[in-house]
Amino acid sequence: MYLPAKWSLSPSNTCFFHTSAALEKRQSSRFKRTIKKDNPLTYEQANPMYSIAVRKSWNSWNTSNLEGGLRKAETAFEDMFIRKFMFGTWHKMFLSEVIIKRRANLIVIGGIINRQVMQRKIYFLTGYTEEILSYLFKCPVKIELQTIADKSEMIVRYV
């Protein structure tokens, strides 16, 4: 097998992962400002990550991550499954993040949805979701929804 000199397999050329100062910047929850300031931000997006627990709260409330808590991995996996299930079942109806609260044996799922959806559809999906998730997780599941007329009501500021 012929390899050019620059592609030789010497020990000095085996590292293919390089870091630079540009990769070490903290970029989470920072949204790029536009010249016209037409990028809308919701309340969750407008607050920086370091203000969690000061100005805004967590999207998942559970106590399994405390020292000595049980089911850490299972709780994280269930929260991920609940979010995927909600966005799949309530397709394009949620205008906010899905908030999951665990109170003893009860799972409470909250969020903001669009008011233009028919009430019958909302009631059906609420009952369907509560029954399926209760059966899967073997604990009661309750859904608390708020409705707003338009997505523009979610906008706090523009950047």
Image (tube, helix red, strand yellow):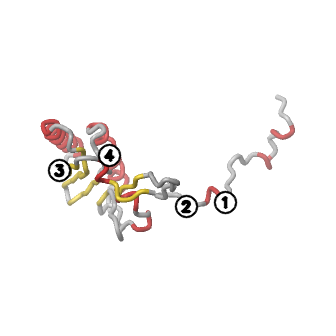
Mark 4, Cα crowd under 10 Å, few <14 / some 14-19 / many 20+, is some
3D distance between C-alphas at marks 4 and 2: 26 Å
3D distance between C-alphas at marks 1 and 4: 35 Å
**For residue 48, above or below residue 15:** below
Which numbered mark, 1 or 3, is in the foreground of this view? 1
Which numbered mark, 1 or 4, is in the foreground of this view? 1
Q: Position of residue 14 (x, y in %)?
A: 75, 46
Residue at x 70%, y 46% (from the top left corner): 16
Which numbered mark, 2 or 3, is in the foreground of this view? 2
What's the mark number on residue 83?
Answer: 4
Residue lying at the far bottom of the rendered structure: 54
Q: Amino acid at mark 2?
A: Arg
3D distance between C-alphas at marks 2 and 3: 37 Å
Disc with the residue nearer the chain's start (1 vs 3)? 1
Q: Amino acid at mark 1?
A: Ala
Q: Secondary structure at mark 4?
A: helix
3D distance between C-alphas at marks 2 and 1: 11 Å
Q: Amino acid at mark 3?
A: Lys
